[in-house]
Image: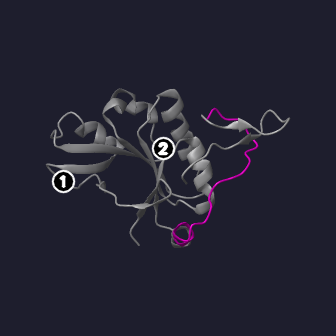
Amino acid sequence: MAAQLYKDGGFVADDWRHLGDDDLLPEAGAVILPLARFLESVATAPASLKLAVLLRAADDPDALAPHLSRLELIAVDFAKFSDGRGYSTARLLCRRHGFDGELRAVGDVLLDQIPLMRRCGFTAFEIVHAPTRRALEAGHNVEVPLYLQPAERAGERPAGARAWARRPAASPV
């Protein structure tokens, strides 16, 4: 089943194409490359080709620091829903490096993970899981009304007397 891009509260067209290590680079368009391939291609890619990077769980997001100003999109792979390293990667990219482009969760993205992913900085989601896709298409509310751990997200506000409890900011997802 092909992935569909969920962003800003609905499914949208995706202009980006994933390429593997052995796929030829096109002369134009928008492609998402694995980290190693991105690092070796970034200096020689044609100016008419928009590059993005796919970070896998074992990849070091700090390797992208010198290139963040030219990236519109970083995709973070969740190979298994039970592997939480992608959440840490997102936090590092947003908080440590100040990345403010599209941060996309790809792979095994499930409905109940989306609010937590958004809280870590994700703004778009490639959905391949059929039940998640159906729930989102049906307008299922994926927001959590109360978080019980602190975070430094703009718009979150304290919820009651507990310093760690937060109400989420208004969001389109």
Q: Please, which colouring scheme is shown?
A: one colour
Instruction: Classify the position of the C terminus by image quarter.
Output: bottom right
Tell me, for residue 119, which label it has, or none: none
Measured in 3D between alpha carbons, the distance from the residue under mark 1 to the one under mark 2, in whole angstroms, is: 24 Å
Which residue lies most toward the right here? 161
Nearer to us: label 1 or label 2: 1
Q: Identity of the amino acid at label 1?
A: Leu
Main SS, magenta region, reads: loop
Q: Residues within 10 Å of mark 2 (few under 14, many from 20)?
A: few
Magenta extent: 134-153
Instruction: Classify the position of the N terminus by image quarter.
Output: bottom left
Query: For residue 46, what is the image quadrant?
Result: top left
Q: Is residue 141 magenta?
A: yes
Tell me, for residue 24, which label it has, or none: 1
Picture coordinates of residue 94, whole percent (x, y) = 50, 34
Q: Secondary structure at mark 2?
A: loop
Picture coordinates of residue 66, whole percent (x, y) = 35, 26
Q: Is residue 45 magenta?
A: no
Residue drawn where x is 73% and y is 45% of the image: 147
Picture coordinates of residue 124, whole percent (x, y) = 46, 51
Q: Is residue 122 left or right of residue 71?
A: right
Query: For residue 15, what is the image quadrant?
Result: bottom left
Residue drawn where x is 48% and y is 47% of the image: 123
Q: Is residue 13 left or right of residue 103?
A: left
Tell me, for residue 58, which label it has, or none: 2
Q: Identity of the amino acid at label 2?
A: Ala
Residue drawn where x is 32% and y is 49% of the image: 32
Q: Secondary structure at mark 1?
A: loop
Q: Is residue 142 left or right of residue 95?
A: right
Picture coordinates of residue 145, whole percent (x, y) = 72, 51
Tell me which numbered mark, 1 or 2, is placed earlier along the sequence: 1
